[in-house]
Amino acid sequence: MVESIVGCKWSLRLLGVLAQGPQRPSALRRACPGLSAKVMNERLRKFQRFALTSRTAHGVKPPIEVVYALTPLGARFCGLLAEIDALQRQIEAR
């Protein structure tokens, strides 16, 4: 399962941006230069399937405002990724 989530180079970046707080899709794209809308949407859908993020749509008529946020499980997952990153830096420093 973890491979499926972090198997794309954009997954960690998107999760990192979402860890800073709820974001609109346009803010996610600005935070990740070079990320295509197609790949971003695929990643966000995958995160939703694994219950790492939630998608909230505000409004009834277009244009609706969509906001993505980490779920409690997603926040725990990001915490684990941060621990792995710290461990990797510690090993590289040796």
Image: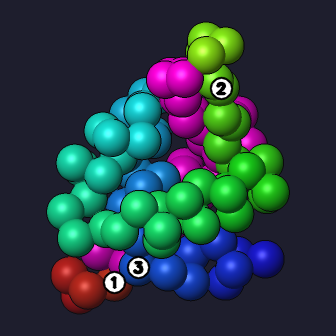
Q: Is residue 24 magenta?
A: no
Q: Residue tagged by mark 2? A: 56
- Under circle 2, the secondary element is strand
Relative to 1, is 81 above or below? above
Tag 1: residue type?
Ile
Q: Is residue 72 magenta?
A: yes
Q: Can the viewer see residue 90 in this picture? A: no
Pointer 2 with pointer 3, Cβ within 8 A:
no
**Position of residue 21 measured from the top left corner of the image (x, y, whole percent):** 43, 28
Please, what is the dominant secondary structure of the magenta stretch?
helix
Relative to 69, is 12 above or below? below
Give the quadrant of residue 46: bottom right
**Position of residue 7 measured from the top left corner of the image (x, y, whole percent):** 56, 83
**In this image, 90 relative to 37: left or right?**
left
Per the rendered image, the range of residues in magenta is 62-90
Q: Residue tagged by mark 1? A: 91
Disc with the residue nearer the chain's start (3 vs 1) = 3
Q: Observer-nearest residue: 15 or 26?
A: 26
Q: Which mark is residue 9?
A: 3
Which residue sits at x=42%, y=32%? 23
**Position of residue 36 measured from the top left corner of the image (x, y, whole percent):** 35, 68
Disc with the residue nearer the chain's start (2 vs 3) = 3
Give the alpha-carbon distance from disc 2 to disc 3, as whole Å: 25 Å
Pointer 3 with pointer 1, Cβ within 8 A:
no
Which circle, 2 or 3, is nearer the viewer?
2
Tag 3: residue type?
Lys
Relative to 66, is 16 above or below? below
